[in-house]
Each structure stands twice: as structure tokens, then as C-alpha cells.
Amino acid sequence: MNRALANWKWMFMYQNASLSLMPAVSSDHYPLILDVIPVHRVEKHFKFEAYWADHKDCFNVVKRGWCKEEQNGDEWDKISKKINNCKEELKKWSKITFKRADREIQRMKKELKRLQDLDFTEENQRMIQLLKENIATLWKQEEKF
């Protein structure tokens, strides 16, 4: 049996908190997730993601950005523009090619929980195993992220 305990003071401090029962993925335990829902947002800066380099198209995306013709400015200005071109190409490509791993994992976990709550059938077990493998792949992607 899963339980959580909170007093009134804690509940007042974390009014937006939610508690969720997650599906069992790599064990037979169903984890509880406490989300206190942070309110502030952090500005994102461009960072090259390590998992991009594992993709077969990454080299060509960088090459496409680098090879865009830059006519104006001195050599340093041209190099700076080429780097920015690569950054923009990578951002566009990433948005199309990679879905947000955290959202995909949450979606797959919901589906996994739904399947685990259904009757035991061979087809359900096959789908459960496939979802677990896909979640594990996305976890590896998140680790690199």
C-alpha cells in the first residue's frame, strides 16, 4: 500500500503540490511522485546536446549550417555567422527529430500503467515490454541531456 503524509503547514507552503502513482517500469514497485510545481522559469541558452551526435543526420545538419554562404563582414564576423547558422540549423532539426524525452516518458508511463491495469494477455505483455524498452531508451537520452 502506498501512502503520503502532510500537515496543514506543509500543505499551505506547497498549495500546488500533487502526488501521483506511477507505473512499475523496471521493478515491481509502483513509485510515488511528489511534484511541488515550481513557479519560476529559467531562460534557456543554446547548448549542443550529446545525444545529437549519436544520430546519423547530425553531421549533415552541422555541415548545412556551416556551408551557408556569408558575404558580409571580416573573417571573424563570417565565422561567428557560420556558428550561429549551425546553431539555428541544429535547433530546427532537433525540434523536428527529437520529441522532448520527459514528455514522451510521461506519455509512455501513462500508457504503461493503463496496460498494466488490464487483463493479463500475451498481446498486453508484448506491448508492456515494448513500452519498457522505449522508456529505457529515452532514459539513456535524458542521461546524456
Image (tube, rainbow, N blue to C red):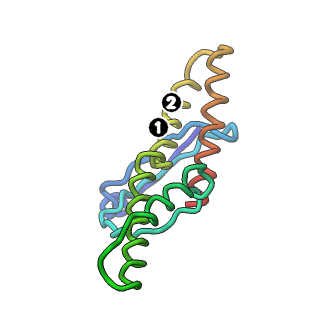
Kindly identify which numbered label has been placed on residue 107.
Answer: 1
Question: Are the residues flagged by discs 1 and 2 in contact, CB closer than 8 Å?
Answer: yes
Residue 87 is situated, as x and y percent measured from the top left of the image, at 42, 65
Residue 76 is situated, as x and y percent measured from the top left of the image, at 40, 85
Residue 113 is situated, as x and y percent measured from the top left of the image, at 54, 31
Kindly identify which numbered label has been placed on residue 111.
Answer: 2
Residue at 67 percent of width and 22 percent of height: 126
Cα–Cα span, label 1 and label 2: 6 Å
Kindly give the residue lying farthest to the front in the view shown.
Answer: 71
Q: Amino acid at mark 1?
A: Arg
Residue at 32 percent of width and 73 percent of height: 71
**Placement of the C terminus among the 4 image quadrants:** bottom right
102 or 35, which lies in front?
A: 102
Q: Place residue 123 in its image quadrant.
A: top right
110 or 60, which lies in front?
A: 60
Q: How many marks?
A: 2
What is the crowding at mark 1: few (fewer than 14 residues within 10 Å), some, or many (at least 20)? few
Residue at 58 percent of width and 46 percent of height: 138
Question: Is residue 70 left or right of 98 when viewed as pictured?
Answer: left
Question: Secondary structure under badge 2?
Answer: helix
Residue 90 is situated, as x and y percent measured from the top left of the image, at 44, 59
